[in-house]
Image (cartoon, rainbow, N blue to C red):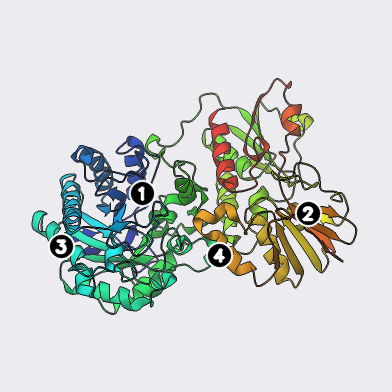
Amino acid sequence: MTRFKHLFSPFKIGNLEIRNRVFMSPHGMAGLPIGSEAQAGYFEARARGGCGFMVIASCMVQPEPLMPPGWFIQAYDREQIPAIRNIVDAAHKHGSKIVMQGIWISQAAASGSAPHTMMADTQPRSMTVPEIRALVEAHVIAAQHAEEAGADGFEFPIGGGAGMQSFTSPLYNKRTDDYGGSLENRMRIIMEIIDGIRERCNPDFVVGLAVNADDSTLGGDGLSEGLAICKHLSDSGKVDWLRITARGQKPQMTHYHYPSSYMGEQGTHIYAAAEVKKVVDIPVVSGGRIVDPAFADQLIEDGKVDMIFVARSVIADPEWPNKAQAGELSEIRACIGDLEGCFLRSCIGHPVGCTVNPEIGSEYLGEPATTDRPKRVVIAGGGPAGMRAAYDAARRGHDVTLLERTGQLGGHVTMQAMLPGLEDRSDVIRWMELQLNKLNVDIRLHCEATPELIRELGAEAVIVTTGARYAKDGVSKNQLTPIPGSEYEHVFTPEEILLEHERVGKKIVIYDNTSYEVGPGIAELLADQGKEVFFVTIDSGMAMSVAELGVNKVISKRLMPKVTFIPDTQISEIDPENVTLTNYYTGETTVLKDVHNTILVTSKPPQDGLFHALQDSGLEVYVAGDAREAYWSVFGTDEAIKDGRRAAMML
């Protein structure tokens, strides 16, 4: 019996009966071939996992020259109806309702007065009226194709960076004809699209819109315009639901559109949705990094929303709804909010995945097959790669012993989870440790793997996952020689501060050449303890490796008031009392005097000694995670978990 009063209660959108209030919001799964077993299997896993309502993301209503081929469904092309049908059938098989999201990303816009940066930094020209009419027709045709494929409805966005916002928002739309000026005129194209769909599709075919209800981040006056748009849509009697977001405008304000763990709160869009609900009489759907089912249920109880949208929670764990409904909350593998495996990969052309779920795209293959030759397997190192290797090896039927040199599992993930804004990363280790215990993996802490011990354990195969440690000498991608003075005892690495609990003085220099979140995290941690912190980096800003996510903006806003920030700068020398800095561009030197400690966050040499020592052992030996190739920046945990799985599947 579920403990949740509302989240798993039936609901109705239009004439569509939905089994619960869990709405899987659209999210692009770039890298999964269109309509393939992998793509259909992705949706099927989440339908089977309990999502009541699903949206197929980013189906283009018109061609987009800048879109990489094969990334998104071409909803304008009849040839892709079978691909859409494959996805729809996979969702319907398990009782989920599914609609298609039609998007328009064009090199033209309502008017040319404002930059539009969805696909590139450009300022598109104003559209002609015939082009506007063609765009209306394109949306209607896309909806017809969705209906022909068996989809239950159609959604299109007018916010978050997608093109239709260029018509509805007065920030973008400066037209003086029938498509600009008043709210009614700015909404004209939207209503023409809706009217066209209503005219040509079945009456039970539902239609919804995604609305960015708060445009204040780009100069708007807040909710007033968004509320007027939502009321206009509701009052028309032609719209079945509204999916509400707020403030997020890709790419300028991506950190609102895809809130990370640094944002702290769940439900980042709910404040706007709650206001929308006061002025409309159709279902309102919203969310914003919802990870806790109880929190979601309470939002419905409080009347702030009718349905909860989730994306990353069901990317991380397709069974999130089922586990929640069954009361198995500890079994949920939570999204950690790093955005690296999902959105960041799509930004740079990688196949989309998930940091904590390495099985994205392989769901259709089912559980890994049990081996017909069980082996005694030793995993050397209990970080994320080692824990995942142990998990998959044990699932396949091997007899697994996991050796960890220190007194705790987790490696660099445990260290990162000690930092402000990254606490959610601890769930990676919690969940995997829970699974290893259920699989009866022999976990030995304070036990360093050596060739002698591995032989004593009777190992037939070894997976070396001994990880990496930050360089003591300050060597980095920008500075391949050791920093003079790095050998002094008052110079530390992140591990020594966070895992080995070295004590530091009052005045601290942190030198970060990794462009990631660890250096800023340590700086914030120490500043919050009352230390005087100087954050030095060769980069022009903080955490620039996560700039695509907007996380660098969030970090900078948190950290700037707390530390002295010194960009574009290298440490040229450390002495017992002072740190000499050199500006990378001007060569100007500055001396920070009376420094108590310097913390070097620069590179991470693999700890590969055991791997080399086992080369002539006669054992089956694999190496995975940072011990194979260390990541000091983005994708470190993502790649470690994937690599651990790969090694286990090779046994």
> Is residue 625 placed above or below 122 in the rendered structure?
above
Q: Residues within 10 Å of mark 2 (few under 14, many from 20)?
A: many
Tell me the CA gap for discs 3 and 4.
39 Å
Q: Secondary structure at mark 1?
A: helix
The residue that label 1 is drawn on is: 46
What residue is shown at x 56% (from left), y 55% (from top)? 427
Q: Earlier in the sequence, mark 1 or mark 2?
A: 1
Can you tell which of label 3 and label 4 is closer to the viewer? 3
Q: Nearer the viewer, residue 6 or 179?
A: 179
Residue 61 in picture, x, y percent from top left: 24, 49
Q: Residues within 10 Å of mark 3 (few under 14, many from 20)?
A: some
Give the number of the disc on residue 411.
none
Q: Residues within 10 Å of mark 4 (few under 14, many from 20)?
A: many
- From the viewer's perspective, is 265 left or right of 512? left
Q: Earlier in the sequence, mark 3 or mark 4?
A: 3
> Is residue 356 placed above or below 506 in the rendered structure?
above
Q: Residue furthest right?
A: 576
Residue 267 in picture, x, y percent from top left: 43, 68
Dot 2 amino acid type: Ile
Q: Quadrant of residue 645?
A: top right
The residue that label 3 is drawn on is: 192
Can you tell which of label 1 and label 4 is closer to the viewer? 4
Residue 157 in picture, x, y percent from top left: 29, 60
Can you tell which of label 1 and label 2 is closer to the viewer? 2
